[in-house]
Image (cartoon, rainbow, N blue to C red):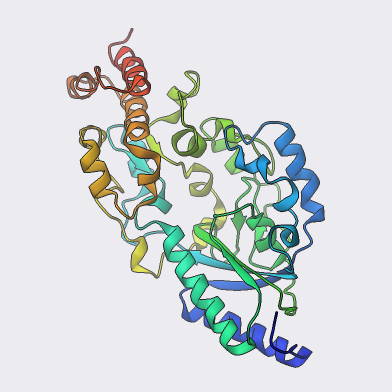
Amino acid sequence: MHEQALNKTELSRLAEQIKHWGRELGFAAVGIADGDLSAAEAGLMTWLDQGFHGEMDYMAAHGTKRSRPAELVPGTVRVISARLDYFPPAAADPHAVLDDAEAAYVSRYALGRDYHKVLRNRLQSLADRIGAAAGEHHYRVFTDSAPVLEVELATKSGLGWRGKHTLLLNRQHGSWFFLGEIYTDLPLPLDAPEAGHCGTCQACIDVCPTQAIVAPYSLDARRCISYLTIELKGSIPVELRPLMGNRIYGCDDCQLVCPWNRFAQTAALPDFAVRNGLDSARLVELFAWSEADFSERLAGSPIRRIGHERWLRNIAVALGNAPASPGMQAALGTRLDHPSALVREHVAWALARQQGD
């Protein structure tokens, strides 16, 4: 706990300092909310009951800790949420990549360095500054690393509102940003939540290639291409494969079509600059990477976490969705005898598609 309690004026001054320090550390904005997520808890439980989390068992395993911050970190009375822009400033036009069936589409957030480290280091620096100013305080930093309802918390802290695609939206920044949190026992003054501004628009619902947004504000992860290419460990459902196009890691369609992203800011940090030409790489070229190539070139990238086997699985599907060509078929032929049954299955499916079987 704190060495001595701060009074209301000191807490108010500290809250302003936290926002200032956040900007110095590269965050676009910082907001403060209480830990009362009771309004969101019923929706979370319904979502889990419907099985929309798929194989993401960790979503259910933590029970109410996700919607009750003080259960996850005892003593928590406030959550400091921070927003960090990530859209790479010099990346190839995402629409052009999606339109080029022989190119590989990688979600824009994954083109550079793994955001977990970038975000965590900056949040830890912010927590250190708070500690230096307020004395010892009980806190914990989160970057997508524990059961946290980050969009709900960010909404409560005034950083934006939940869009119909379930991501956080901001009028000045769209949705191309990461969120991170500091749970703290400092009773800081609260920021006012922002009202929603989606109106009657449902562009994100209409554009989703697999119709994973089953209703406004409700996503069936089992159909989401981000889930299929990143979270799903086994075989991708056959009926969904043709709908994935050339998306080999994640999907941005719901963000690309959102009118609010006209106002999005590009990343200020060099960490999110494009690496390995992944903003418009060719499918055949990436499919040829050996396991050593994959590990070496994607060191420090979030993509590395899916492993080489799922990398090949995902690219095989994209090759199967590309127009028939000898080059595509030859590339697939090189993996027909791959040691992994998962890879062999997806390669066989893709070859059949390529050959019109």
Q: Is residue 326 above or below residue 117?
A: above
Left or right, 252 with reference to 163 = left
Q: How many numbered circles are shown? A: 0
**The C terminus: image quadrant:** top left
Q: Position of residue 136 (x, y in %)?
A: 63, 83
Above-or-below relation of 217 to 155? above
Give the quarter of the figure containing the N terminus: bottom right
Residue 173 picture location, percent across and down: 53, 64
**Image quadrant of residue 72?**
bottom right
Choose between 295 and 165: the one closer to the eye. Answer: 295
Q: Is residue 27 visible?
A: no
Q: Say which residue appears at 75% left-offset and 92% top-offset.
A: 9
Q: Is 233 above or below relative to 199?
A: above
Question: On the image, which quarter does residue 37 sit in?
Answer: bottom right
Please say if 26 is above or below 116. below
- Residue 61, x across and y down, in percent: 66, 41
Q: For the view shown, which residue lies furthest in the top direction?
A: 357
Q: Nearer the viewer, residue 268 or 293?
A: 293
Residue visible at 60% across and 62% down in the picture: 170
The residue sitting at 24% across, 17% down in the picture is: 337
Q: Residue at x 50, y 19 (%)?
A: 239
**Rendering coords of residue 207 (x, y %):** 54, 37
Q: Is residue 206 left or right of residue 92?
A: right
Closest to the observer, 229 or 29:
229
Please state which of residues 15 and 89 is positioned toward the viewer in this rendering: 15
Question: Is residue 94 something one can see in this rendering?
Answer: yes
